Image (cartoon, grey):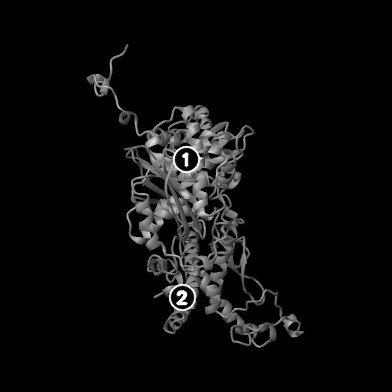
């Protein structure tokens, strides 16, 4: 027989109480809550209905239910899903009057929700917007509990409708808040009954059980046994060798082991761990090398469980075409074809806004036909209304000569080469005129166009400056007192290494340059004109070079930014957006 611990009740000859074992579940007051909203994110959506049921020991203690005026339009698909129409919420209270009542109803209780991250996220956002401190509610998610208690043989998924059928709830979920909350109450009671076989009888045990690693995570812990404690990239692979997930870390062993613990709560990642059969690692000399290798591997293998950086080729470019009467075209590739480019841009919408900003300043033709002098002479060119309203010189009708049109082309080339002043000046004039006439919606449209252009131009100019250098060698202080080295050629990381503390740097620099990858300046690229790497890779390198303590060792070529470039305007654009008050419409305040 072992002696009792000196701090335990038995050590003092006193019998332990239930309080020593935690709060019995029969004595816990749960508030089961469900929300209906206008969308999926609190950033751009609002609550339309709150439903909550208070229970303890299986007994119903009360309920809370109300429609909420979201302060905006309810999308048609939301109305079709929930049945909540605009007319139903017209006379409903706003969230600022509903929220205090709900917080009082739930005070001192444990919140329960099905997919709690969604509902609690909206409630926290509402508290922040209304200036209320979020109470430190304990939260239980029935989705997490169901994934641990039920197996796939019992339920194919953990949707509320599926669990309601499995537990035969008295109320069927119907995408209305109070009905779904009542159904979740029955699901909670069914899950708690199942938890008895796991020895879970207290609130503390219930919360710990919800955070425990899944059986798949526990079973796969051995995959981290051979992972080294070094910076690098890790690749989770299935039985066929297919890459499931790729990540990076400064300590591979610590990061990979975290995937097999309760701290990893992401459903998709836990699902990935269940499919993984091995973890392949690539040790790297520096954190920058690990970050770059991760980007390249994700772009190459496109793992199904990675969400970002999978498609660097999907960037867009604004191109001044090479033809007798050039125009601005949106393309997916930047080629060495003698054309002028702006970008890269992350979406077609941004490209269209940047193009519209340039068209406001430079009257280039906006039609997509290929104009030639012969086509114009024969009168076979298609015409449009832009020439009649003065938005185009109408070279298609020979109203503007090739020489006169070339003036606009030269101006456009100058803008794409780095002088953004004509576009910025034209946009400011229009914004000021529209704002003076209180036409704020139109002023905001012009602001958005200008912002898209400035950001694209600034990004392209930064990347182009790096891509234009045949070689840049830089060093950054390391944590151990040595140095991290990087050799960058035409924007691509060609080599990475380290210098030990107190060592003479020159031999290490020379050796790294001699063994660095050979990089050719031009190929079809998604990075920058003249570059040999994807834009995201070059931006990683630029962030590294902007970090404190960086020392340029060698620079081959000219690393400069245009005097009248867009970089100096980025802060001005960002401040214009930051000027909006929380909750105010983006179009409610023009650029100033």
- Give the quadrant of the N terminus: top left
When the figure is inspected, residue 544 is found, relative to residue 14, above or below; the finding is below
Task: Name the residue nearer the viewer: 230 or 98.
Answer: 98
Q: Secondary structure at mark 2?
A: helix
Which residue matches tag 1? 265
Q: Position of residue 278 (x, y in %)?
A: 56, 31
Mark nearer the N terminus (2 vs 1): 1
Which residue matches tag 2? 424
In this orientation, does residue 143 appear? Answer: no
Q: Badge 2, how many Cα within 10 Å: few under 14, some, many 20+?
A: many
Q: From this viewpoint, which residue is outermost toward the top?
A: 1
Q: Position of residue 452 (x, y in %)?
A: 50, 68
Residue 91 is tagged as: none
Q: Position of residue 86 (x, y in %)?
A: 53, 67
Which image quarter: residue 83?
bottom right
The Cα–Cα distance between marks 2 and 1, rounded to whole angstroms, is: 47 Å
In this orientation, does residue 327 appear? Answer: yes
Task: Name the residue nearer the viewer: 460 or 69.
Answer: 69
Q: Secondary structure at mark 1?
A: loop
């Amino acid at each position: 027989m072992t002696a009792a611990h000196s701090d335990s009740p038995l050590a003092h000859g006193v019998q332990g109480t239930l309080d020593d074992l935690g709060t019995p579940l029969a004595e816990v007051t749960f508030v089961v809550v469900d929300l209906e909203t206008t969308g999926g994110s609190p950033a751009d959506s609002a609550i339309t209905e709150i439903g909550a049921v208070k229970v303890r020991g299986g007994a119903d203690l009360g309920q809370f239910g109300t429609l909420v005026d979201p302060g905006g339009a309810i999308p048609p698909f939301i109305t079709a899903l929930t049945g909540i129409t605009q007319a139903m919420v017209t006379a409903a209270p706003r969230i600022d009057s509903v929220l205090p009542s709900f917080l009082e109803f739930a005070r001192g209780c444990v919140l329960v929700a099905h997919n709690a991250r969604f509902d609690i996220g909206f409630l926290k956002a509402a508290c922040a917007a209304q200036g209320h401190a979020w109470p430190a509610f304990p939260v239980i998610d029935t989705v997490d509990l169901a994934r641990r208690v039920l197996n796939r043989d019992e339920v194919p998924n953990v949707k509320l409708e599926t669990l309601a059928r499995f537990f035969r709830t008295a109320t069927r979920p119907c995408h209305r808040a109070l009905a779904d909350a009542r159904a979740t109450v029955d699901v909670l009671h069914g899950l708690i009954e199942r938890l008895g076989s796991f020895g879970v009888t207290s609130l503390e045990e219930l919360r710990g059980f919800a955070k425990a690693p899944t059986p798949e995570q526990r079973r796969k812990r051995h995959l981290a046994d051979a992972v080294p404690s070094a910076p690098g990239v890790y690749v989770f692979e299935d039985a066929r060798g297919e890459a499931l997930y790729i990540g990076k870390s400064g300590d591979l062993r610590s990061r990979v082991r975290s995937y097999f613990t309760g701290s990893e709560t992401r459903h998709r990642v836990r699902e990935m761990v269940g499919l993984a059969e091995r973890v392949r690692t690539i040790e790297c000399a520096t954190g920058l090398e690990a970050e770059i290798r991760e980007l390249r591997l994700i772009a190459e293998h496109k793992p199904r469980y990675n969400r970002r950086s999978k498609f660097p080729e999907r960037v867009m470019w604004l191109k001044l075409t090479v033809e007798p009467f050039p125009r601005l075209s949106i393309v997916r590739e930047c080629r060495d074809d003698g054309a002028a480019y702006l970008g890269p841009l992350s979406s077609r919408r941004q490209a269209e806004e940047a193009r519209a900003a340039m068209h406001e300043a430079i009257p280039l033709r906006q039609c997509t036909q290929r104009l030639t002098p012969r086509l114009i002479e024969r009168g076979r060119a298609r015409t449009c209304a832009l020439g009649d309203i003065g938005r185009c010189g109408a070279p298609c009708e020979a109203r503007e000569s090739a020489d006169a049109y070339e003036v606009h082309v030269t101006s456009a080339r100058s803008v794409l080469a780095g002088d953004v002043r004509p576009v910025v000046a034209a946009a400011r004039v229009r914004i000021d005129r529209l704002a003076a006439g209180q036409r704020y919606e139109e002023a905001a449209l012009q602001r958005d166009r200008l912002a898209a252009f400035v950001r694209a131009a600034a990004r392209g100019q930064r990347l182009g400056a790096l891509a234009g250098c045949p070689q840049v060698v830089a060093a950054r202080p390391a944590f151990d007192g040595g140095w991290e080295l990087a050799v960058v050629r035409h924007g691509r990381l060609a080599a990475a290494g380290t210098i030990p503390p107190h060592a003479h740097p020159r031999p290490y620099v020379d050796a790294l340059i001699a063994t660095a990858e050979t990089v050719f300046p031009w190929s079809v690229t998604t990075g920058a004109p003249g570059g040999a790497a994807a834009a995201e890779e070059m931006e990683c390198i630029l962030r590294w070079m902007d970090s404190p303590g960086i020392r340029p060792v060698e620079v081959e070529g000219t690393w400069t930014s245009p005097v009248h470039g867009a970089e100096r305007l980025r802060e001005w654009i960002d401040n214009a957006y930051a000027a909006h008050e929380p909750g105010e419409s983006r179009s409610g305040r023009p650029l100033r």
